[in-house]
Amino acid sequence: MQWKKTLGEMTPYKPGKSIKEVINQYQLEKVVKLASNENPYGPAPSAKKLLENGTFEIEMYPDGNASSLRKKVAQKLDVSESSLLFGGGSDEIIVMISRALLDSGKNTIIATPTFPQYAHNAKIDGAEIREVALVDGHHNLDGFLKAIDKDTAVIWLCSPNNPTGNLIPGEDLKSFLAKVPDTILVVMDEAYYEYITDPSHTNTIDLLKEYANLIVLRTFSKAYGLAAFRIGYAVGNPEVISNLNKVRSPFNVTSAGQALAEAAMDDDDFIEKCSLLNREQMQRFKKYANVNKLHIYDSEANFVLIEVPGNGDIASEKLLKQGIIVRSGEALGTPGYIRVTVGSEDQNTGFFSAFDSLLADVQLLK
Ligand SMILES: *Cc1c(COP(=O)(O)O)cnc(C)c1O
């Protein structure tokens, strides 16, 4: 077979273990997954109710235009309907951007470490990837500017950044955008937007009026609790959106996903409550890290990147045996750390007690 050369250097995405796998592998009764930043409180009651009582025309293709959801999101964000593009998760929007703009001869600039799908897709599409190291978990935007040349087609920003959780301050973003040539698409991935509380954050949707080369990605997978239904979207200049729409597959977002996303949007209070609980629980992680003298990044999302004694792989394996699934920093470009989703109160208590025994092991070794 005549595969693209680049595939030889690639491996398929390796997700964290599922709850079922861990239960079977370690003969455990209860397993908590704090590995993929899903909402520990589930979707909004309004979405749950629709799933229980709603009927879907299962034999029919979905509305490829996602018209009803489009109208609702446009109203909520106060943007035109033609400013929106929906995808099977924002993951699929990343694929569309890469496919529409990147190929050999082009380059793309990303932070490192950041969400791996930007580089993954750029690689498949043959573009050169320019990585700019984070500084204390933050994007080094000056470094990004220096990496730009005439062949730069896409810049990926992730705020809060996965896996560190750090936010790009609004003022930094604005001065960055003012300096980036308008021939380069700047992608602002805001998968954790709903969790942000830092006042230095700026409303990126407002910036779209000023910068036609900016596109903002949001998702229903995280705070909205609909990860299983794969639905995310992009907000951008209608011309940009219209070009991306050319590479979208015709029925890319399921009927159930569209309907559930709409229903979930009817419960702003739920999202606010989840964000508040996340803040409260996040404080426990910060306190735990401080008490145990472990470094923790300043996260504005629903996960934390926390230092472990020794190696992240070994630490996450030890936690796994106690029924707690986390992501090893070794796999995320941050060795010596683990990334932990901020769970519910009980889940986090379970995590801390598992981590306590990990720390006790280290004491014994000393
Ligand atoms: C989870 C995540 C996504 C993907 O979310 P989906 O909408 O489920 O595809 C995109 N970007 C970042 C930074 C994420 O953490």
Image: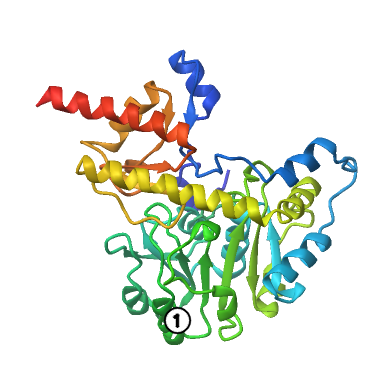
Hey, what amino acid is under mark 1? Lys
Label 1 near ligand 1 (CB < 8 Å): no
Residue positioned 27% across, 24% down in the render: 357
Residue at the disc numbered 1: 174
Q: Quadrant of residue 242?
A: bottom right
Query: Camera-side residue: 12 or 342?
Result: 342
Residue positioned 87% across, 42% down in the render: 56
How many residues crowd mark 1 within 10 Å: few (<14), some (14–19), many (20+)?
some
Above or below residue 155? Residue 230 is: above
User: What quarter of the picture does the N terminus occupy?
Assistant: top right
**Where does residue 143 sit, x and y in percent of width and height?**
31, 74
Query: Camera-side residue: 348 or 334?
Result: 348
Q: Quadrant of residue 213?
A: bottom right
User: What quarter of the picture does the C terminus occupy?
Assistant: top left
Q: Residue furthest left?
A: 366
**Where does residue 131 sit, x and y in percent of width and height?**
35, 64
Name the secondary structure under disc 1: helix
Query: Camera-side residue: 42 or 308?
Result: 42
Q: Is residue 228 left or right of residue 25?
A: right
Q: Is residue 263 left or right of residue 9?
A: right
Above or below residue 162? Residue 349 is: above
Residue positioned 27% across, 43% down in the render: 289
Identify the colour scheme used.
rainbow
Above or below residue 108? Residue 51 is: above
Residue 227 visible here: yes
Residue 247 visible here: no
**Where does residue 285 sit, x and y in percent of width and height?**
35, 44
Count of all numbered marks drawn on residues in the image: 1
